[in-house]
Amino acid sequence: MAAFTPWPSTWVPADGDRSAQIGGFDTRSLAAEFGTPVFALDLADLRGRMDAWAAAANEHFAPERGLAGADVFYASKAFTCISMIRLVVERGLCADVASGGELAVALAGGMDPARIGVHGNNKSAEEIAAALDAGVGRIVIDSLGELDLISAAAGERGVTAPIFIRVTTGVHAGANEYIATAHEDQKFGLSLTDGSALAAARRAVELPNLELAGLHQHIGSQISDLEGHAVSTRSLLSLRAEIARETGVLVPDVDLGGGYGITYVDEPTLSPDEVCARMAGVVRAACEVLEVAPPRISFEPGRSIVGPAMVTLYSVGAIKRVTIDDGERSYVAIDGSMGDTVLRPMLYGSVYTADVASREISGPTVRSRIVGKHCESGDIMIRDIDLPEGLERGDLLAIPATGAYGRSMASNYNLLARSPVVAVENGEATLWLRRDTVSDFFAVDPAY
Ligand code: LLP
């Protein structure tokens, strides 16, 4: 068994005729009750990931260790719904939202507005108004002009808006590599090197109705090496000291962003404990050198909280064999679509693995390609995988690590339904999001 597995903690593979289980629930029964595709959410696994983040942040940034504490903001873009937010609240995490829609769900889920961070590189006037009216704890600005908009909107309401500046430190990380050049050339953040981050800080201090409360970075996704994070964090902390010298404001908070990688197949990943231990060391050392008090730190993990907690169950449909240069390939069509996770391999070339969930099928395997049901030849979920020769129409295939950016990026292309999310624990299943229906499609069509 691989040291790093993509399967959630309660997953039990199929054994003989018994189907695989998740959360003490038989996957065949789950598919029968909720249909396929279905996102099966391992609630115990999810709760464990939230708790691991909270515990690691509390422990490594504790005042006894010379630091000022840390908060974990769940990046709700990875997956959100009211039940998800309720769990985030219950486990003591905060939430990061990137649109008015995500803000509305966070509020509907009972998140204390003071524990919500609002992002967006192009926030609308309505989104700014909603954030201010709710009284969110932080609004992360992405451009200079936004400061004037927020200052004016806060003035109209007679409130002070807590502002974080998103800083582009020149470091971009992701999928193992980090490169300390050229990543200024993207839409997010205010540049450290061309002085616009410092200019934004000056402006935030000058403008009425704004409180410069923090600095923010987010350097990439699916990161499995913290070197880029360390380099970027040191730059951000130096900027914080420089802003203090220039404006007299030593911002109390620094948000290090998200992006911590997960195992999709067998890739090694870092635990929250490893991330927090390393970053606490970086923050402590940098603040000592800079001779400034350490800030309160935030992390914004999305994928590493919810990604590994879901498995998508698909039904196998058409199977066809084709002859290729060096043998044969089996095309296995699942009932999957851009309504679940099929979009990620198409967009990013993401690689997933799969296992037969309905029963254990022994015997020889065949080189296979798992495809979805859209009218697109690029609709490929897994390009190359060995599947049992005995796989048949009606069998269930399980694809792990689909919790992040699966349901949340689902579309209704071809007017296919987006898949439901069902939370399972101790043999009980609770519907968190239902499948779309044809009535939902007509509901937005006034001509109906
Ligand atoms: N904070 C900020 C400001 C972000 O922009 C993001 C992700 C996160 C936190 C959470 O990152 P995570 O820990 O989940 O990697 N659709 C892509 C991912 C886009 C991520 C965008 N920002 C995917 O499917 O991989």
Image (spheres, grey):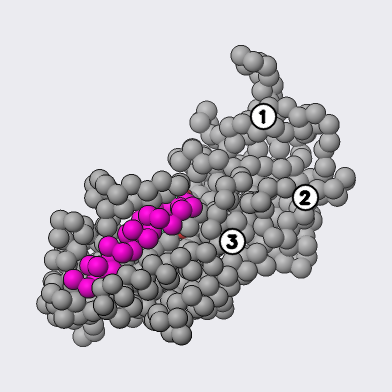
Q: Type of residue at label 3?
A: Leu
In this rendering, would 284 be left or right of 183?
A: right
Q: Secondary structure at mark 2?
A: loop
Say which label, 3 or 2, has the lower sequence index: 2
Range of magenta residues: 217-242
Q: Is residue 187 left or right of residue 247?
A: right
| Above or below: residue 392 compared with residue 443 | above
Other-residue count near label 1 (Cα within 10 Å), few / some / many at <14 / 14–19 / ≥20: many
Q: Label 3: which residue? A: 433
Marks 3 & 1, CB-CB < 8 Å contact: no
Q: Quadrant of residue 153?
A: bottom left
Q: Say which label, 3 or 1, has the lower sequence index.
A: 1
Amino acid type indicated by mark 1: Ser
C-beta proximity under 8 Å, tags 3 and 2: no
Q: Is residue 291 left or right of residue 353?
A: left
Closest to the observer, 53 or 60: 60
Q: Which mark is residue 13?
A: 2
The structure residue drawn at horizontal position 61% and vertical position 46%, both measured from the top left corner, is: 266
Residue 368 got which mark?
1
